[in-house]
Image (cartoon, grey):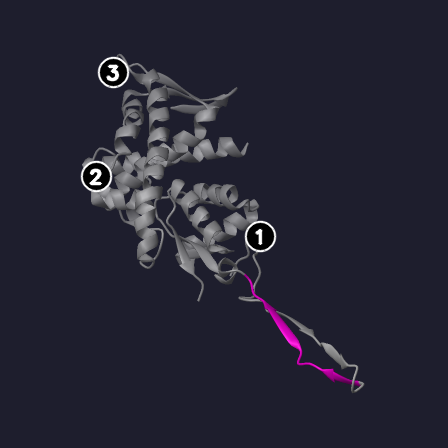
């Protein structure tokens, strides 16, 4: 896999089918799907347990806004990922081009996906810092690889934004 | 602990006293008496008294350090060095006070930080 900035696009080329599939899974992975740990992480409390009235108002007025914000980001990413659709069974490498103006949406969607996967799997800090674990050991190992792969993409996008 | 881009004053209340002395003259007796001084008190509004509130960010093992730094720069307009200092404080101590001041603005900051998926809370300063 190669990743570089080309004009106003971030280009991820030489994507093998496995990594392309992981990318395709970003929008789905960002959904808590009723997992309370993931839901709680995406919509955490705005106070440290006090201010009950404020928390109720927050749930009524702010949470729907946040939900919309997160959803807009994952929809943008899903649209960009349509480039990878078709010939899913082909073993040929693919190229994904992300418009630079979508960088914030990608940062958000990747972060949502990482947080949701980590919450669903209850990854420990030690596990999250283990960047050399093979993804083929178990479903849990694959999820950890997914979190790290998405983190790598986030780092690259952040560096591009700084430049 | 830390100062934000705008600090909304440190005192809880400001009382301004205006003392005036009223002179009353009596033409028949030719005497002049001095009345009690009048004291006018001016207090700040309830909102201004409601200080300070803190915006606290808590550690999260998933969020990338570089991402958290970028968010602090964007939300608070902090220079990179200051944003990194706060990020490291969150990382090592588990939390950092990013800003303190008026409640309404603190709420807005917390909302923005939640939009970036950071663990942020609004807390009343001790």
A163 sits left or right of A142 in the view = right
Q: Magenta segment, which residues?
A: B31-44
The quadrant where residue A106 appears:
top left
User: Label 2 marks which chain's residue?
Assistant: A
Task: Please tell me how crowded label 2 is: few (under 14), some (14-19), or many (20+) other residues with Cα within 10 Å.
Answer: some
Residue on which disc 1 sits? B6
Indicate the secondary structure of the residue bearing disc 1.
loop
| Cα–Cα gap, marks 1 and 3 | 53 Å
Bin the neighbour count of mark 1 within 10 Å (Cα to Cα): few under 14, some 14-19, many 20 and up.
few
Q: Please tell me which residue lies in front, B39 or A135.
A: B39
Residue depth check, mark 1 versus mark 3: number of the one nearer the observer: 1
Which residue is denoted by mark 2 in the rendering? Answer: A140
The quadrant in which residue A121 appears is top left
**Residue A88: which disc?**
3
- What is the chief secondary structure element of the magenta stretch? strand
Q: Residue at x 56, y 48 (%)?
A: B81
Separation (CA) of disc 2 from disc 1: 46 Å
């Amino acid at each position: 896999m190669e990743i570089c900035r080309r004009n106003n696009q971030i280009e991820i080329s030489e994507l093998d089918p496995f990594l392309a599939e992981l990318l395709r899974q970003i929008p789905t992975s960002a959904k808590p799907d009723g997992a309370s740990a993931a839901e709680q992480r995406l919509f955490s409390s705005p106070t440290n347990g006090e201010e009950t009235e404020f928390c109720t108002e927050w749930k009524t007025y702010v949470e729907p806004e946040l939900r919309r914000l997160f959803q807009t980001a994952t929809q943008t990413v899903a649209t960009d990922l349509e480039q990878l659709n078709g010939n899913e069974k082909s073993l040929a490498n693919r190229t994904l081009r992300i418009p630079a103006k979508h960088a914030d949406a990608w940062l958000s969607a990747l972060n949502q996906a990482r947080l949701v996967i980590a919450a669903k799997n209850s990854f420990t800090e030690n596990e999250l810092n283990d960047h050399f674990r093979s993804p083929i050991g178990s479903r849990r190992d694959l999820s950890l690889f997914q979190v790290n792969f998405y983190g790598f993409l986030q780092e690259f996008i952040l560096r591009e934004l700084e430049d | 602990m830390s100062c934000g881009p705008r600090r909304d004053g440190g005192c809880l209340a400001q009382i301004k006293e205006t003392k005036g002395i009223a002179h009353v003259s009596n033409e028949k007796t030719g005497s002049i008496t001095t009345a009690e001084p009048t004291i006018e008190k001016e207090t700040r509004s309830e909102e201004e008294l409601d200080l300070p509130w803190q915006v606290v960010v808590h550690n999260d093992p998933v969020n990338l350090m570089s991402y958290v730094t970028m968010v602090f720069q964007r939300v608070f307009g902090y220079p990179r060095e200051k944003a990194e200092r706060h990020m490291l404080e969150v990382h090592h101590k588990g939390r950092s006070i990013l800003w303190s001041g008026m409640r309404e603005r603190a709420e807005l900051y917390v909302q923005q930080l939640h939009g970036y998926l950071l663990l942020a809370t609004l807390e009343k300063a001790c």
